[in-house]
Image (cartoon, rainbow, N blue to C red):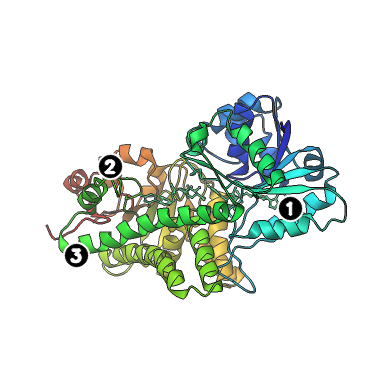
Amino acid sequence: MKISKICCIGAGYVGGPTMAVIAQQCPDLIVTVVDLNKDRINAWNNPDLSKLPIYEPGLSAIVNDCRGRNLFFSNDVDKAIFESEMIFMAVNTPTKTYGEGKGMAADLTYVEKCARQIAKVSKNDKIVVEKSTLPVRTAETIKSILSSNGNKIKFEVLSNPEFLAEGTAIQDLYKSDRVLIGGDQTKSGKIAVKALVDIYLNWVNIEKIVTTNLWSSELSKLVSNAFLAQRISSINSISALCEVTGADIQDVSIAVGKDSRIGHKFLNASVGFGGSCFQKDILNLVYLCQYYGLHEVASYWKGVIDINDYQKSRFTNIIISSLFKTVNNKNITFFGWAFKKDTNDSRESAAIYICDKLIEEGSNIFVYDPKVSKSKIESDLINLWESKQFSSSEVKRRLKKVTVCNSSEDAIKKSHAIVVLTEWDEFKYLDFEKIYINMEKPSFIFDGRKILDKIKLEKIGFKCYEIGKSELL
Ligand code: NAD
Ligand code: UGA
């Protein structure tokens, strides 16, 4: 079965880059990416490539190459579904904020809506591919929605979770460690799996393509994220122990990671992991374990989130206690707002929670991030404060305490402390001698990303704190 037209519902951080790479690697395939969000689609179609809705190194060149040739962005969801033989669902699956499973389970509203729309619009057989991260056995729900449309159309459902990381999405898609495809073990299920395998074979080596049943594929995605986040929480928990014992987390990380059974990746201590997925996917895993009565398993994984929350509040408390136990009316500069470098995404970024707590304590916050917009920074805070049910006048009052700056230079004037929250390369190369002159004294730096040279900064005169480095020696 050779597929010639595919579409992807959801033009976000997964749908956009993933489909752009498929279009580039499969020039004979017509790829349409659709979304309900008009602004997002307009931005994908913007002739000015610097205005694409997602910043991701290498992405704009691919869009420039393929857009209008075999890659299209559109709001016409029905038309794309109708014309496509294979439909990817890459819609958001956030943590539920209401009802049963509130704060834990994945909200499948958007996935269900897509399935209903596919069922309604389709006039011929189709393969439906889960690209979103979903709780195990979601395919069962999707199948039952698709098969209840009352006509004779046959749908095959595949699970093809995405493993790209933001900031390196294009490289990750080019050189995936693996492509995972789950499908039914029936004859038609196997044909559908093969059709998707054939698309990936355009650039992915066959040894890297893992095929499983649907449930293993769905669960493996949640477990992969849980294992990755677990490593960060493990190293972050040890960073606290380093600070009180005189060990250095960098040394410990290198020493531990040299064991080839452990490996060196994902052992960078930090201010805490952020991003749209680690927390939501682990909470979802915890919820699933609880649902199946596996309470010990649930509490084991919940610990990963607890340590992450602990690391964020531990870091904030260190800022407050170092600044003579009060930050009231003190100016604090944030270097970075994104949850990691090389992305304009700030979902669940540690910066949001640290900012909230410092404002609660009366600080004035000056933020500079090279890629996150002022409106995004403000909406991150407004959403958080609204979720805490603050009145609109209180939200406004708090927002006035935050100034979003266009450069690091603007953000440090009269500042009492700099807090490094995102590891953007440009922060490493700033002229800290000049910065020091423009700051209040004593001038503090809190390096939540371990990217600055503490010894050099202390020579300039800064008082420095670096995660996982003891003050004892
Ligand atoms: P996103 O919020 O950036 O994008 C989702 C898009 O889907 C939005 O633009 C939204 O408007 C659109 N949408 C929702 N319902 C729709 C509908 N019925 N019809 C048309 N469009 C609709 O989300 P994302 O970061 O791209 O994540 C999508 C999924 O992929 C999630 O399940 C996530 O867990 C998973 N994932 C994300 C990443 C990542 O790096 N962000 C990596 C791997 C997997
Ligand atoms: C993560 C996974 O790495 C992807 O494989 C997965 O597809 C994706 O989640 C998803 O499902 O959404 P992402 O969140 O984009 O990707 O970025 P990561 O590089 O994993 O970083 C996540 C967070 O952990 C960031 O805040 C980062 O700064 C932090 N981190 C990462 C550390 O604090 N220390 C590390 O050693 C590594």
Q: Which residue is mark 3?
A: 244
Q: Which residue is mark 1?
A: 114
* Residue displayed at 52% across by 48% down: 345
Queried on whether the Cβ of the residue with tag 1 lies below 8 angstroms from ligand 1, the answer reads: yes
Give the CA separation, mark 1 to mark 2.
51 Å
The correct choice, above or below, for 123 with respect to 21 in the image is below
Under mark 2, the amino acid is Phe
Q: Nearer the viewer, residue 435 or 348?
A: 348
Q: Which residue is mark 2?
A: 432
Under mark 3, the amino acid is Val
The correct choice, above or below, for 101 with respect to 149 in the image is below
Horizontal arrangement in the rendering, residue 43 relative to residue 384 (left or right):
right
* Residue displayed at 50% across by 67% down: 286
Q: Earlier in the sequence, mark 2 or mark 3?
A: 3
- In front: label 1 or label 2: 1
Q: Dot 1, how many residues are within 10 Å of its Cα: few (below 14), some (14-19), or many (20+)?
A: many
In the image as oriented, which residue stretches furthest toward the right? 151
